[in-house]
Amino acid sequence: MDSESLKEKTKRVASLYFQGWEGERPFDLWKSFDHGLAKELSIFVTGQMYARERIPHTTRQLVTVAALTVLQRIEELKLHIHAALNVGCSVEELAEVIFQMAIYGGVPVTNMGLKALKEVLESRGQWPMREKDGD
């Protein structure tokens, strides 16, 4: 793929995932220190990794949310919860993935993840949610 096509693909996927995100994006942080490296990282992460079609964007984001929850990377978790909602993950799916992380990271990790989910939903005007009966 030529470099112009890769740039366009990177922009398209970045828009799909991060459109509407109010916080600082990693690319903006990287760019403030090294514009060239920021561009290369963005092309690799967004234009090559996130753009791969071996698994759907929804699956990729659920996996990312699970990993960031267990690793307790709160700011990045919020960004990817936002991205997950943008690509079509439901709130129920996200909550379920975060609840499952109690097995691998403990209940405090789950609480932290659910708080991040709630904060993202609040910022998007999607909180409070209607109460649903659990399974």
Image (spheres, rainbow, N blue to C red):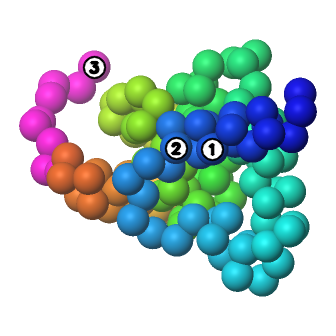
Q: Residue at x 72, y 18 (%)?
A: 53
Q: Badge 3: how crowded within 10 Å, few (<14), some, or many (20+)?
A: few
Q: CA distance from mark 1 to mark 3?
A: 40 Å
Which of pointers 3 and 2 indicates the residue nearer the eye? Answer: 2
Q: Are marks 1 and 2 in contact (CB under 8 Å)?
A: yes
Q: Badge 2: how crowded within 10 Å, few (<14), some, or many (20+)?
A: some
Q: Residue at x 38, y 53 (%)?
A: 20
Looking at the rendered structure, the kind of residue marked 3 is Asp
Q: How far across and down, in percent of the image, does residue 124 sit?
A: 26, 53
Q: Say what secondary structure mark 1 lies in.
A: helix
Q: Identify the magenta region.
A: 127-135
Looking at the rendered structure, the kind of residue marked 1 is Lys
* Left or right of 118, for residue 85: right
Which residue carries the number 2 mark?
A: 15
In the displayed structure, 58 sits above or below 115; it is above
Q: Say what secondary structure mark 2 lies in.
A: helix
Q: How far across and down, in percent of the image, does residue 129 sit?
A: 15, 42
* Left or right of 49, for residue 81: left
